[in-house]
Amino acid sequence: MNNNNLRNFWEVSYEELEKLNLAAKAESETAPEKMEAKYKEWLAKEKRIKAVTICFTDIESRLHMLDYDKKFFLDSLSNLTFDGSSVRGFTAQHESDLRLEVDWTSIRFVPSDIFGPGKVILFASVMNRDRTPYISDFRGRLKAYAADIKKKHGYTAYAAPEIEGFVFEGRDAEQNYSEEAGFTLVSMGGYFHSLPLSTLRTFIDASAEAQRAMGFKNEKDHPEVAPSQFEMNFSYAEVIRAADNTQLYKFLCRQIAHTMGLTASFLPKPVMGINGSGMHTNFSLAKAGKNIFYDGKGREGLSKTAWEVILRLLNHAPEICLILNSSVNAYRRLDPHFEAPNQIKVSAIDRGSMIRIPVGNQRTARIEVRSVAPDANPYLVLYTILRTGLEGEALKKDESKRDRLRYLPDNIYDAIALSKGSKFLARILGEESKEKFILHKQASADRSPKALGTTVKRSEVIYHHEVYNQYLWNKF
């Protein structure tokens, strides 16, 4: 018997999904206070919706999803709880109960062939039992900081991460990784060398189609320089939406690869001898609808404000490096032989600089932080970049000394030590979140050899925060 005939769950075309998602995005920018009432009413009336998927991200960057029965969700909105002790990087067992506060401006209508029929998704902020913001939820903290700079300075922060990744043969290729076999690439081509119906191109096309349907407003998608590597770019957005897009981008890629019998990986350097993957993070500030990073008469077309942000980021680069490169494997990517952005400097042309100034105009002027790895927590990254750029101490040149080129740490142990000793990082993250983040990074580092060597070790793959499961972690 075919039980599909018994079901009547909500399913619409990709074209209709894109219209719905772009309309919801526009509405969130003009009338966010009305969205809760509107979509609660819509959910109550739409009988074909069976579940609401709630998304949140832990401190290391794993995306967590909870499916609530629609009726239960609507009846329990004021008391959505979960066990925080079950989420690595959240609470201890004795203080485990946490709450979820739904962000109605984040609603997404989703492709049924990826998420299943009859669902919509929403992001949520994590709250304590007493409904105060949970200190280690950096989506909530980024949202609060964005609101704060809007209120105090009239600033709106925008971002557009460029996220690279690899596609490998086989499902669960990371969990099954061995040093002897390594990963099996699906394509030996690079930039522009992938045929239209090749496995890599088919994967890219399917992923980009799903992203467009979910309102990403894609700009371009293509194979990257390394074989079996990809990148899909989506449009500039306010920082919260940009970070949400980043998490959904990686989820969609993994899910689509899985359905094709493949693995989409965001390890920064999974294969030695070829380029690694980055998450080049473009961002700018606007005020009263005007890009305040632009000055046609300024150096490289940037304003004084933009240069102040750059100098603060350069000054604090060593101590925030662990935030931007949060895994053992990330430090393989900071290798100068492969366009590594490991030099603590800014340049319009030198791709070895951690900050690049792309060609821009009054609308597109921005700065690009190139030293961000694709496995970093996008909320934590954007929160750190914003607070450092606006509140940090600017780099000052000592005219009595000759310029000396500084480099980012080349291993996670040095990065941990620099973060541990940073009073600035403790101030912007809070001592508790700083210590918690470093504790998890230290635990991962301790499971791998201190010297990276020339072979990608099994330990740096299976104990990676986006790869491990409880079984793998407990085998150590």
Image (cartoon, rainbow, N blue to C red):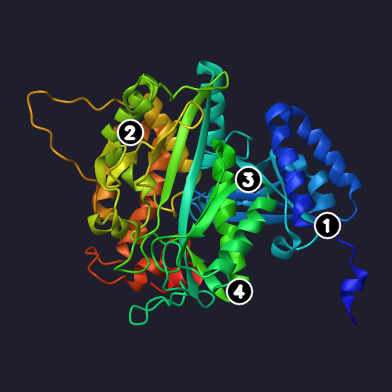
Q: How many marks?
A: 4
Tag 4 or tag 1, which sits nearer the N-term?
1
Is 423 rendered above or below residue 261? above
Instruction: Kindly report which numbered mark, 2 or 1, lies closer to the viewer in this rendering.
Output: 2
Is 137 rendered above or below residue 365? below
Read off the residue under disc 2. Answer: 313
- Cα–Cα span, label 4 and label 2: 41 Å
- Crowding near the residue tagged with mark 1, few <14, some 14–19, many ≥20 C-alpha atoms within 10 Å: some
The image position of residue 355, as x and y in percent, is: 33, 39
Read off the residue under disc 3. Answer: 217
- Crowding near the residue tagged with mark 3, few <14, some 14–19, many ≥20 C-alpha atoms within 10 Å: some
Q: Is residue 437 in view from this perspective?
A: yes
The image position of residue 170, as x and y in percent, is: 52, 78
Front one among 143 and 440: 143
Read off the residue under disc 4. Answer: 260
Residue type indicated by callout 4? Met
- Identify the secondary structure beneath mark 2: helix
Q: Is residue 104 in view from this perspective?
A: no
